[in-house]
Amino acid sequence: MIRARKVTGLAARGVALAAAFAAAAAPPYAAFAQQAEPQAAAPAPAPAPAGLSESVAAVVNDDIISTYDLAQRMRLLIATSGIQPTQQNIAQFQREALISLVDEHLQVQELRRQEREQKMSIVATREDVDEELAEMARNNNMSLDQFVASLAGQGIDVSTLRDQIRAQVSWQRWIRGRYGSRLRIGEDQVKAVQQRQEAAASKPQYQISEVFIDANRVGGPEAALSGATQLVAQMQQGAPFPAVARQFSASATAANGGDAGWITAGEMPPEVEAALDQMRPGQLSRPIPVRDGVYIVFLRDKRSGASASIVSLKQAAVALPQSATEAQVAAASATLETLRGQVSGCGDIEAKAARVNGVVAGDLGEAEIKDLAPAFRAAVETLQPGQVSAPIRTAAGLHVLAVCAKRSGGAEALSTEQIESRLFGQQLSMIARRYMRDLRTSATIETR
C-alpha cells in the first residue's frame, strides 16, 4: 500500500495570490438575485486570473490539480462563504480549496474503482448535476442561464461548480447506499438516548448551529484552531453562519447550514456544553477545541428544563417615583383598580389601558417564575391564566399583571423515530469521515 507523500509550500503562495483575489470579493449566492442583471446567455468561461500562469498545484494518485483549478475553487469558496478575502485569510481560503479538491479527486477515484469492480454506474450523470444546478438557480429566483452568468461575472467557470456538485452528490449517494442499508439502530441505543433525555429533562436545552473543523482533515489541531479562529473573526464581521458552515464544516449538519436543532446534555462534547452554559441566545462562541478538532457554535435559542415554571405576562403601569406621596400612590392605585375591573385578561388589557391617561401597558413576554422580581413572583404564583393581579408597588411605580399562560419548561421528548433518525445520521457521518481518512492515508498526494 502506497503511503502519502506530502510536500507543503502553500502558505508562501497564499500572499502571492492575495492581490489576484482581492478584487474578486463576492457576495454569497443568496445575494446574486439582487446583484445580477438578467442575461440571455452566459458569457464565455472566465480566463485564469491575470498574472498567474497555469501549473501543477497538486497531484492526487496521478490526477493533476492545476493552479487554475485551485484559483477557480478559491473564487467559488469566496463567493459562497460570504467571507471577504484579505491578506490575513487568503492562505486559509487556499488551504481549504486545495483540501476540498484533493478530497473530491479521492472520492471520484474511489467511485470509479467501485464502478469497475461492481460493473454499475455510481458517479452522478450530467443530468443529475443539471438538476442540482437548476435547484440552486431556483433558490436564488433565477433562471439557470442567469445563475451561470452570475458565476461568470465573478470569474467562476460553471464547470468548477459542476465538478464540486458531481463529487458531493455521488459520494453522498454511495455512502448512504453502501452503508445505510447495513446500519441498524438497536433498541438499546434508543433506550440509552431516552434515559439521557430523562436525566437531562430538568436541565436547559439549546438550539444551536455548529461548525466543526476536523483536525485530521486540515492538518492537525493547531491548523484546526487557527482556521476556526479566522472563521469566528469573519463571522463577527458579518459573514453568514450558514454559508460558512456549508463550506468549512466537516459535520453532517453542514448541508443544512450547520443547523443542529435542539440539543440536551450528553449530545455534544463536554467542552461544547460547558461553553453553551455560559452563552446567551444570539451569541457566537469562541473556537472550542475537542478531541478530534474544533467547534464553533451559535446559540440561537435556549429554554429551561422541564422542572421550571414558565409564565407569559402583560402589564399596565403608572410611573411613580419612590418619593411619591401617599395621596399620589392612592390615586394611581385607584386608577389601576378601575382598569383591572374593566379588563378580562391579556386579550384586552393593552387596548383598554391605552384609553386611560397616565397608564402604559405592554407585553412582558415569557420568563421563569423564579427569575421574576420578588413582588411580581409573589403575585404571579397565586394567579391563573386570564387573571389580573392587584396593584403592585415597585421602585418604578405601580403595576397590575395579567397572566397570559403558564406552562412547564422544556420540550416534549424526541420520539423513537426521531432518535433513530438522529443516530442514523451521526453514524453515517462517522463512517464517511473514517472512509475519507483511510483514502487519504493510502493515497499518494503531492502538493507543490
Image (cartoon, helix red, strand yellow):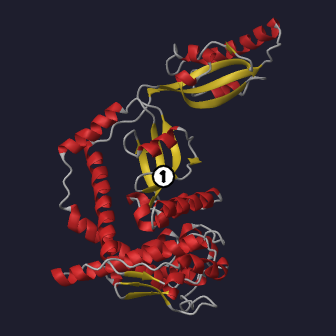
**Between 203 and 302, the one nearer to me in the picture:** 203
- State whether residue 30 is above or below residue 286: below
Name the residue: 48% across, 65% down.
248
Residue 305 sits in which quadrant? top left
The image shows residue 428 at horizontal and vertical percentages of: 28, 59
| Residue ID for mark 1 | 289
Name the residue: 66% across, 72% down.
87
Considering the numbered disc 1 on the image, is that residue within a helix, a strand or a loop? Answer: strand
The image shows residue 345 at horizontal and vertical percentages of: 57, 22
403 to the left or right of 35: left
- Quarter holding the N terminus is bottom left
The image shows residue 364 at horizontal and vertical percentages of: 62, 30
Name the residue: 34% across, 78% down.
106
Residue 111 sits in which quadrant? bottom left
**Residue 176 visible, this orientation:** yes
Q: Which residue type carries mark 1?
A: Pro
